Amino acid sequence: MEEIKEQGRKLWQSLWWPALFVALLWAVQGVQELFHLNWRIYGVLPREPIGLRGVLFMPLIHKDWGHLLANTPPLYFLSAMILFFYRKVAFRAFAFIYVLTGLAVWLLANMSIPFLGLTGERGFHIGASGLIYGMVAFVFWSGIFRRSIKAIALSLIVVFYYGSLFLGILPGQTGISWEGHLFGALAGILVAFWYKQDVERDDLKPKPSWETEDELPPSSFFDADIFQKTKEERRRDSF
């Protein structure tokens, strides 16, 4: 019974925290629309000092309601999945993916690479898509690195539902921060590798009974004195 209550509390918390984060995103978008604000300038502007603030604000800001609506279901579902199944590292993994994605975009996005057709146009990067890609990669690669049945099953679920997302890391997509997607995915892989040894409590296999039983003192298959008796003594014992 206590175990059921514990699982219930765990499920509730796993659903509650992502709901708070999604509510924050919707509140930010609501204020932006209500007061006709343009908070795009608080996104990441690569290699500009002022653009560093976007490391904190980029996932919170969206272009419009359509952009936010597209990000809300995967953001909520993946956050809840990680909180429930990877509770031991969930908050740390989320924070590292959040920050590493923003820093990588600030350092490397909007670069001019002619043979890839990239012109290095200046622009702000906004939206939680990079965070979503990071969480997808974290769950998938955790299955590969950890090799537990649970982790592998979760990675297969993510591939089934979100495998098509990885088309978004291809360069040259107008109006889409493909760099945010790419660096988010790479951050997720790095974090999955970093925390691969942090095994969850329910992944710990109980020791087999023969490993937990007290060791018996050494004994002989035959009675110790059987070979010490004389022929006459054994003959008497047989009667």
Image (spheres, rainbow, N blue to C red):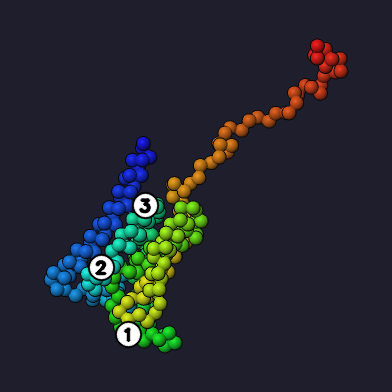
- Tell me the amino acid under the disc marked 2: Leu
Of marks 1 and 2, the one in the foreground: 2
The residue furthest right is 231
The image quarter in which residue 156 lies: bottom left
Q: Residue at x 39, y 63 (%)?
A: 161
Q: Report the residue marked by disc 2.
A: 68
Q: Residue at x 35, y 42 (%)?
A: 6
Q: Nearer the viewer, residue 196 or 170?
A: 170
The image quarter in which residue 51 lies: bottom left
State which quarter of the image contains the C terminus: top right
Q: Residue at x 39, y 79 (%)?
A: 171
Residue 203 appears in the rendering: yes
Q: Report the residue marked by disc 3.
A: 84
Q: Helix, strand or loop at disc 1?
A: loop
Q: Helix, strand or loop at disc 3?
A: helix
Find residue 196 and report its horizontal and vertical position in percent.
47, 57
Of marks 1 and 3, the one in the foreground: 3
- Tell me the amino acid under the disc marked 1: Glu
Asked if the residue under mark 3 is in contact with the one under mark 2, i.e. CB atoms within 8 Å, the reply is no
Mark number, residue 121: 1
Q: CA distance from mark 2 to mark 3?
A: 24 Å
- Tell me the amino acid under the disc marked 3: Phe
Residue 165 to residue 214: above or below: below
